[in-house]
Image (cartoon, rainbow, N blue to C red):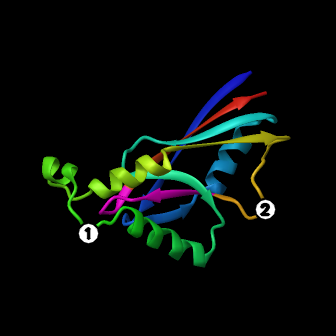
Amino acid sequence: MKVITRSFQVETNGHTDILDITPQVSQALSASELKNGILTCFIGGSTAGITTIEYEQGLRRDLPELWEELVPSNRGYHHDATWGDANGYAHLRSSLVGTSFTVPFVEGRMMLGTWQQIVFLDFDNRPRRREVIVQIMGE
């Protein structure tokens, strides 16, 4: 078994910005030349998340609305009082989504569903440059 680690940068707008990172992850898998195994996408940050959705206009509007209902950005959080950065909600949203996503691959192809894309969610309250780490394990 081999383990290969790659990374790529994304530029975000914050405020529950949703980016389809499937092409970059597919490129990392292709460059690895591994055929069968698992890959994990990871973001080293506590105000972002990685998950899957069907990356279409309706869901790209629905998901931020859902997050605003579940963890509103316009209320005070203890974190905000501690640090004064007004992004306590972003940390909570990130903890619920998680900062990693794992998918198996077979014959060099991720086993995603037909309408399933890997998405990066930036919950922070400002634009950011983020590094996504892709670790690929297989043969």
Image quarter where the C terminus lies is top right
Location of residue 39 in the rendering, given as x and y in whole percent from the top left corner: 66, 38
Location of residue 1 in the rendering, given as x and y in whole percent from the top left corner: 74, 21
Classify 121 as above or below 62.
above
Amino acid type shown at disc 1: Asn
Gap between marks 1 and 2 measured at Cα: 36 Å
- Residue at left offset 76%, top offset 36%: 33
Highlighted range, magenta: 118-128
- Residue at left offset 40%, top offset 69%: 69
Location of residue 56 in the rendering, given as x and y in whole percent from the top left corner: 63, 73
Give the residue pinned by disc 2: 114
Nearest the eye: 50 or 21: 50
* In the image: residue 124, left or right of residue 51: left
Q: Quadrant of residue 23?
A: bottom right
Neighbour class for label 1 at 10 Å: few (<14), some, many (≥20)?
few
Neighbour class for label 2 at 10 Å: few (<14), some, many (≥20)?
few
Q: Earlier in the sequence, mark 1 or mark 2?
A: 1
Residue 3: in magenta span: no
* In the image: residue 32, left or right of residue 122: right
Residue 130, can we see it? no
Secondary structure state at the residue bearing disc 1: loop
Give the residue pinned by disc 1: 74
Q: Quadrant of residue 129?
A: bottom left
Q: Quadrant of residue 126?
A: bottom left
* In the image: residue 43, left or right of residue 3: left
* Number of marks drawn: 2
Amino acid type shown at disc 2: Thr
Residue 28 - label: none
